[in-house]
Image (cartoon, rainbow, N blue to C red):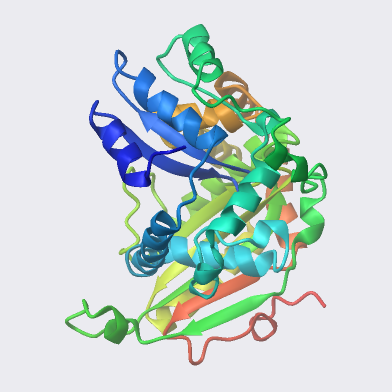
Amino acid sequence: MDNSLFQIDRGVRSVGAALEHLEVNKKYTGMRVDARGDMWQNPTTNLFTCVSAPRFHEADIERFRDTMDALLEEQRWQQPRDYCVDQLETIAFHKETLGNPRRVPVTANDACSSKRLLDHWAKHATPDRVIISGVNVDHQALVKAYEDAPFPHSSSAPHHSRSDKNFADQTNEATTYQGGNENHEQENRAKEIGQKPDCEAETIAAIGYKTFGRDVSVKDYAAALVAQQAMNLIVKDAIRYEREDTHHGIRTFYRPYSSTGLFGFTVRGTEEEALRQVQRTIDVLNAFKPTEQQRAFAISRAVVRLFHNELERTSDFADFLATSAQSPEEVEAALKAVSLEQVDKALKTLTRSQPAAFTTGDAHAWPSIKQFGWSKQ
């Protein structure tokens, strides 16, 4: 509580550990420590103190204001596909809980004052909402470290008296989806980024549909994962450990939330190429009837993707243990049991909803959803 951000960071690094922040499925936020198996107690105790008695010093916040601006700009240039999907979320769930931006927007940066952050923490970070998970650490030792932390986290503390008892309803997330919303961010990326010697124009677009969530039904969640890989077979998106955003072409994405999800694809290329890719992918999606062979291939790919995204690294596995309603074995079994009918149902769920769209780059002549012929109104 009395340590500055610099002192906390120095204490963590002094034992060869690393501290990072995390956000999972727009439902969980937290912090993670990676440390040696014989030197985890000290950085973990610091972590527990940060949760139970945080220090929102104005000097630290001012530093983070610059950091947040830099991270947003870096994502915009270095991971333009992820940037477009992040912006798509704010459009598809406009002014709803799921529409909150994942990164601090420039327009809201100055609003992150010490008082507002402290009020937000006191309102949401109550002890009954704290989840602790660990990988390669003794369970009882981890629990004891939390219980013996210098500043016990108590729900009876005065600042938690203003906690939000009526948390956001996660059972009706699907009703907050606003299909048909779109936004086009026109910019000359070659000029703005300054790292394109040939000054070639490019367009990056993200198209998304409402689909199944992660927590309500493991069968529906597994069906959505397999449906994504079935689409990857059609658009020739092979499994990659390093999915470089710099490459042109079509990539699918699936962002599951609690009771709903956002499924779609991104394209990158010249404006003419991007237009052709978008229309071709929409046509394929509307007419796609997966075969038994495609189902089997898609299941194999989905299992590989699950292990790579959720289980392979210890940090990802810790996040999975803390935030997943199912065990890894349950998700894997559900993936392997997905039927052709379930895949078809997941795909039809997409086409029954109206898409939302976000475009950046050279988008002077980019058609609207209505002009594309996707409007269902």
Q: Residue furthest bottom?
A: 364
The answer to which of 42 and 58 lies nearer the viewer is 58
Q: Residue at x 50, y 68 (%)?
A: 109
Q: Residue at x 69, y 33 (%)?
A: 157
Residue 213 appearing in the image? no
Q: Residue at x 61, y 62 (%)?
A: 89
Q: Quadrant of residue 93?
A: bottom right
Q: Where is 273 relative to 350, above or below?
A: below
Residue 269 appearing in the image? yes
The answer to which of 108 and 94 lies nearer the viewer is 108
Residue 326, horizontal then vertical, whole percent: 64, 25
Left or right: 366 as drawn, with respect to 123: left
Q: Residue furthest left?
A: 197
Q: Where is 250 relative to 133, above or below?
A: below
Residue 363, horizontal then vertical, whole percent: 47, 86
Residue 196, horizontal then vertical, whole percent: 22, 79
Q: Residue at x 58, y 59 (%)?
A: 264
Tally of numbered discs? 0
Q: Quadrant of residue 40?
A: top left
Residue 177, horizontal then vertical, whole percent: 74, 62
Q: Quadrant of residue 215?
A: top right
Instruction: Give the quarter of the figure containing the C terminus.
Output: bottom right
